[in-house]
Amino acid sequence: MDFSNEPPKLLELLYGVIAFLAVVGVLLFVLDKLPMRKERWIALTFLFPAGALLTIGLVIPAIRTFILSFTKPDIAHPGTNKFAGFENYIWMFTEPESRHTLLNTLLWVLLVPTVSTAVGLIYSVLVDRSRGEAFAKSLIFMPMAISFVGAGIIWKFIYEYRPEDEKQLGLLNQLVVWLGGTPQQWLLKGPWNTLFLIVVLIWIQAGFAMVVLSAAIKAIPAEIVEAARLDGVTPWQMFWRVTVPSIRPALIVVLVTITIATLKVFDIVRAMTGGNFGTSVLAYDMYNWAFPFDNTGRGSTLAVFLFLLVTPIVIYQIRNLRQQREIR
Amino acid sequence: MTVVPPAVVTGETEVAPGGVAKRVGKRLTSRTATVVSILIALLWTVPTFGLFISSFRPENDIKGDGWWNFFTNPSFTLENYQEVLFGTSNVNGRLASYFINSIVITIPSVLFPVFFCSLAAYALAWLNFKGRDWIYIGIFALQIVPLQMALVPLLSFFSRGVSLGGVTILPAWDLQGPDKFIQVWFAHTCFALPLGIFLLHNFMADLPRDLIEAAKVDGASHPKIFRSVVLPLIVPALASFAIFQFLWVWNDLLVALIFAGGNQRTAPLTVRLAEMAGTRGNEWQRLTSGAFISIVIPLIVFLSLQRYFVRGLLAGSVKG
């Protein structure tokens, strides 16, 4: 293999690291040497790098995206956009294809948070204080470190299809064959194929739910549990009347966090079906319209819609976090 | 952070007499509970395990039958790795090159946000100035903005510059070749800031006030306090944010796809793998070993530094 392409990259990395050290050095030097009495000026210097980057990289672009969502490509002047009013928004809710995408997104949002939280909760209750708890938890937690693309490939391998007369490569089809069924092309047939993609995200997110809920379960005061035990509750009652109410704030945080992650899912769809066979979701369509199709108006509209969906959830979570902090 | 250290971190803990422990333990170590938890554990590990086993099977075996046949008919080869990493033809992936790209992208994309966020978090936690709370709320609120909101304009900022009414305010960066890494670093740094500042602010604000006051009485200036008092104390927080950012950047597909482009000169592993999964979906000898190559580094980082990662999770971090 030809390695002539590699040294320039490493040189670039070196430049990057040197630039970083220079930035650190200059900022600390300026802070040290300038005779600044007023805290306001010191604060300005401390905040400047982050503030400037946030403005250039996030605030201004977000405002421009919002404006772009009211435009469409100007055919008379290629490469520019013209005002389109609410056309894109009407398109999003009326075009069958984009409506299908929205429905898929809804299915993801309904299933992923609930199922992964349920699995995480059940598992953390089951292994709580058992022998080898740490190891058992690491097993479920491990997918958190795997990229969505990697997870997509792992599961694509599970769903792999071979015709009936050949040996199966995919575990799922092999199980079907062992049970006497015929192998299926799991990822090609709608509407079920979306469910098979959803499994992948559940697989990734359950570990997150498990870790947070497990910490919450361990924080339940022993007196409460003791009191319940003296009242002679069954394990079932203990779970529903003591455990679940006690960890309610943590449950909400987990559900909300996973919901936000689910709304933005992109990589899994890209790696597994490329958005084909009716599996596209909101964030995937956004990318497709804005970049390969170069229709920034429609792409921006989908981004704005994503933003509108996330906003109430995050506000709810902020209030929830604040209440928790006050209780502490 | 007033968070109970989770057991993943501390390992097995002593069973407190009469605690939740005994209770739950006694009731649920029943047979059904054990069966259910083993089933879940299997479901969560077998897929990765199958990929791992497959990546060491010769091509004919991988394409011939399922990976579970490895146990009855074991054969082992490193050829898949050799081919997918260094193979000369275009089909092979040449992942070695993309692996280097991933490293070049990741290191600065972690360093810059960690430093900028700790500076900003310090100002917001320990300096008194007008409008401090409003700036903090503003930055916090930016966590709402999905990065999808910023992609289109940010890309045009790099490729076309900024102009207002025909007057060029900032020229296009127009980065070529390895310089394209700069715009990936820039994008990742921007997108990391709201979460990073929030996370580090929480840790810094929890430091004892007396400590900072004492340093002030000793005549230390704010830059000095930041450097020699605060920074050393929040190393664990810096570590947990750095791990977050590392996993995020290494595993990211969307930002890389847009800002790094799709070719061997700048694109990271995720971009190449997603592409291979699409166009060479049946070349399992390359896909399995390729996927494992992309997984191995985050897995090592994750398993060795799990403690810090979990701490970050429990501090309530949500990445925009």
Image (cartoon, coloured by chain):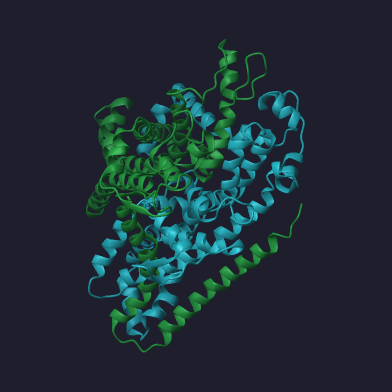
Chain colours: A green, B cyan
Kindly tell me whether residue B16 is visible in this rendering: no
In this view, the residue in front, A139 or B145, is B145
Q: Is residue A14 above or below residue B254?
A: below
Q: Position of residue A62 (x, y in %)?
A: 34, 56
Q: Position of residue A116 (x, y in %)?
A: 40, 34
| Quarter of the figure with residue A180 | top right
In this view, the residue in front, A111 or B224, is A111
Q: Is residue A114 above or below residue A249?
A: above
Q: Does residue A15 appear left or right of residue B7 in this picture? A: right
Identify the residue at image location x=50%, y=49%.
B252
Q: Position of residue B38 (x, y in %)?
A: 51, 28
In this view, the residue in front, B34 or B107, is B107
Kindly tell me whether residue A135 is visible in this rendering: yes
Q: Is residue A155 above or below residue A258?
A: above
Q: Does residue A168 appear left or right of residue A250 in this picture? A: right
Judged from this view, the residue extending furthest toward the top is A180
Q: Does residue B231 appear left or right of residue B277 in this picture? A: left
Judged from this view, the residue extending furthest toward the bottom is A35
Q: Report the label total.
A: 0
Q: Is residue B70 above or below residue A79?
A: above
